[in-house]
C-alpha cells in the first residue's frame, strides 16, 4: 500500500478495543516502494520485533533486539488522533521512557487480530507499523 492508502485505511476504522497479549510487529517504512519489505525484514530481525500489551493495566512493553528483550514501556489509553481528530488508541512513552519520551504511537484495529499504527516524534510523523496478534482481539 502507498502512504495515502495506509492513511485512508487508518482514517476509515474505529479505534477498536485496547489489545491484550503479545503482538508481532512489522515496521512499514517507505510504503509502496520496492524497498519496504526488505527494510521491514531488517528492522524485525535486528531492532524491533513487536509489543506485549497488558490491557487491564493500560501498559505495554516493546520487544527489541534479536533476542526479544522486553523494554521501553508505554502507557496505553484512548484519545484523539493527531492524524484525523477521531478516537484512537495512544501508546504514550512521555512519562514511562527516558529513551523514547518524545515518541507517541497511535493504533486502530483494522481486523480482529490486526492493528495499524502511526509513529510520531513530538508531532512529526515518522513511520507506520502493524501489530498482529495470534488470538483475535475483541
Image (cartoon, helix red, strand yellow):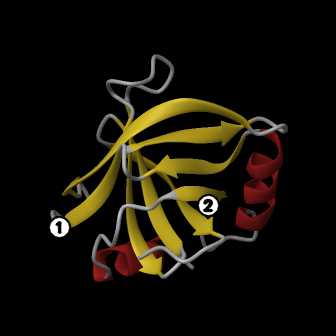
Q: Residue at x 76, y 51 (%)?
A: 44
Q: Residue at x 40, y 53 (%)?
A: 55
Where residue 135 appears, as percent x and y from the top left, is 61, 74
Q: Which residue is mark 1?
A: 86
Badge 2 element: loop
Where residue 114 appears, as percent x and y from the top left, is 53, 74
User: In front here: 100 or 53?
Assistant: 53
Where residue 22 appears, as percent x and y from the top left, is 62, 56
Q: Which residue is mark 2?
A: 30
Specify the quadrant that holds the C terminus.
bottom left
Where residue 11 appears, as percent x and y from the top left, is 30, 75
Q: Residues within 10 Å of mark 1 (few under 14, many from 20)?
A: few
Choose top left, top right, bottom left or bottom right for residue 87: bottom left
First in residue order: circle 1 vs circle 2: 2
User: In front here: 126 or 116?
Assistant: 116
Choose top left, top right, bottom left or bottom right for residue 5: bottom left
Specify the quadrant that holds the N terminus.
bottom right
Q: Residue at x 45, y 60 (%)?
A: 117
Q: Is residue 44 something one can see in this rendering?
A: yes
The numbered disc on residue 49 is none
Q: Residue furthest front?
A: 56
121 lies above or below 40: above
Badge 1 element: loop
User: In front here: 10 or 64?
Assistant: 64
Amino acid at each position: 500500500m502507498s502512504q495515502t492508502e495506509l492513511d485512508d485505511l487508518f482514517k476509515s476504522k474505529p479505534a477498536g478495543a485496547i489489545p491484550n497479549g503479545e503482538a508481532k510487529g512489522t515496521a512499514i517504512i517507505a510504503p509502496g516502494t520496492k524497498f519496504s519489505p526488505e527494510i521491514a525484514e531488517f528492522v524485525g530481525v535486528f531492532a524491533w520485533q513487536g509489543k506485549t500489551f497488558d490491557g487491564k493495566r493500560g501498559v505495554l512493553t516493546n520487544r527489541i533486539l534479536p533476542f526479544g528483550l522486553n523494554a521501553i514501556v508505554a502507557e496505553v489509553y484512548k484519545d484523539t488522533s493527531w492524524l484525523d481528530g477521531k478516537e484512537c488508541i495512544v501508546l504514550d512513552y512521555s512519562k514511562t521512557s527516558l529513551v523514547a519520551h518524545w515518541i507517541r504511537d497511535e493504533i486502530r484495529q483494522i481486523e480482529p487480530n490486526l492493528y495499524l499504527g502511526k509513529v510520531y516524534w513530538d508531532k512529526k510523523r515518522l513511520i507506520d507499523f502493524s501489530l498482529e496478534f495470534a488470538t483475535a482481539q475483541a
